[in-house]
Image (spheres, rainbow, N blue to C red):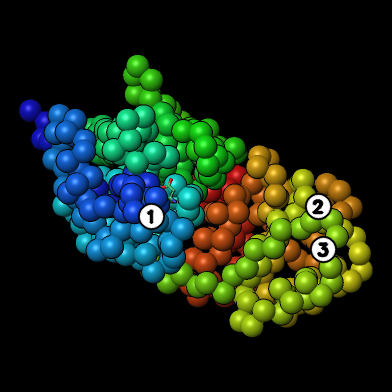
Amino acid sequence: MARKVNILMIYTGGTIGMVKDYASGTLKAFDFDELIESIPEINQLDCNLEGISFETPIDSSNMNPKYWVEIASIVEENYNRFDGFVVLHGSDTMSYSGSALSFMLENLSKPVIFTGSQLPIGDLRTDAKENLITSIQIASLMKSGKSVIQEVCLYFEYKLYRANRTTKISAEHFEAFASPNYPPLAESGVHLKVDEQYLWKKPKKQHQLMVHKEMDCNVGVLKLFPGLGEPFLNAVLNTPNLKALILETYGAGNAPLDDWFLKALKERVDSGQHIINVTQCTGGGVAMGQYETSAKLQKIGLINGKDLTTEAAVTKTMYLLGSGISNKIFKSVFETSLRGEIH
Ligand code: ASP
């Protein structure tokens, strides 16, 4: 008889585990044991479940790289004892955290599934139960003694996505996430269907898990808009210690042709700052050179963010800066797929 799989739930906070504080009318986190008690169905699952919680569960708007290191360390310390990990996390910054962890955990051969909910677990119409139960089932999937999913994913409202391809698209609908540039890895209907062709395949050689904990936050994001002024651009580019800027451009990676604009970018690139071109469109990507308005950016030496989400661009930049790779190879490494995040 096949042995039961061991799943570790990592509770960081988020709406999923919140209750209404009737005095103030706001939602506040409650503790992990109470959360589990609200889902008796969990005991029917065919796996051994254990849980570990942040000392103080947080609203994910308070998320930061220190907490990412905490999640990565929990996975690292428990990696040999468990077959899969389910991270309960607020939906607001879940795509950032899922993207960050995908870079921090290199050579994963086990699933790390982020999930959460739009309504608290205690709410009658909650989406939390399905999200949590199916995430645990997906994390438990095994084939020939190996985990079916071997990457960092995000499960929400019947769909499993590669986490570093997701973005939060709704503060209202249960379908809160989308993965505009990569298909779902699995869907939960009457059957749980995994689309194996889209799963991340590790490089052939079997490497050990490597956990990277240095995330360099000297990163900025600037979204272009018609009317963006020179003083504002210069203030951003001259931010003390800024090492990289994610520039959210228009359409297929286009930006204005004004001399002052291009000159300011060129100066910063020449002085060693990395400027990454990602599109502010939800779907599709940057095709530098397709229009005159992007050919100039290419010439200046901007990095091609292709079809990266902003969330993946920010966290990939923090990870690569933290890894200490040289400025010389930064551009070519950035433009390469490391965890299936980019085309
Ligand atoms: N504010 C909450 C959080 O991100 C929202 C949620 O969990 O859906 O923690």
- Residue neighbourhood size for the residue with mark 1, other residues' Cα within 10 Å, grouped as few (<14), some (14–19), many (≥20): few
User: Type of residue at label 2?
Assistant: Asn
Question: Disc 1 and disc 2: Cα gap in Å?
Answer: 46 Å
| Quadrant holding the N terminus | top left
Question: In the displayed structure, would residue 120 be above or below residue 67?
Answer: above
Disc 1 residue lies near ligand 1 with CB under 8 A:
no
- The answer to whether 80 appears left or right of 160 in the picture is left
Which type of secondary structure does the marked residue at label 3 adopt? loop
Q: Are marks 3 and 1 in contact (CB under 8 Å)?
A: no
- The outermost residue toward the left is 1
Pinpoint residue 332: horizontal percent, then vertical percent. Answer: 62, 62
User: Type of residue at label 3?
Assistant: Leu
Instruction: Identify residue for label 3.
Output: 228
Q: Which mark is residue 24?
A: 1
Q: Nearer the viewer, residue 18 or 313?
A: 18
- The outermost residue toward the front is 23
Instruction: Identify residue for label 2.
Output: 254
Q: Are marks 1 and 2 in contact (CB under 8 Å)?
A: no
Pinpoint residue 18: horizontal percent, then vertical percent. Answer: 32, 48
Name the N-terminal-most of marks 3 and 1: 1
Residue 266 showing in the rendered view = no
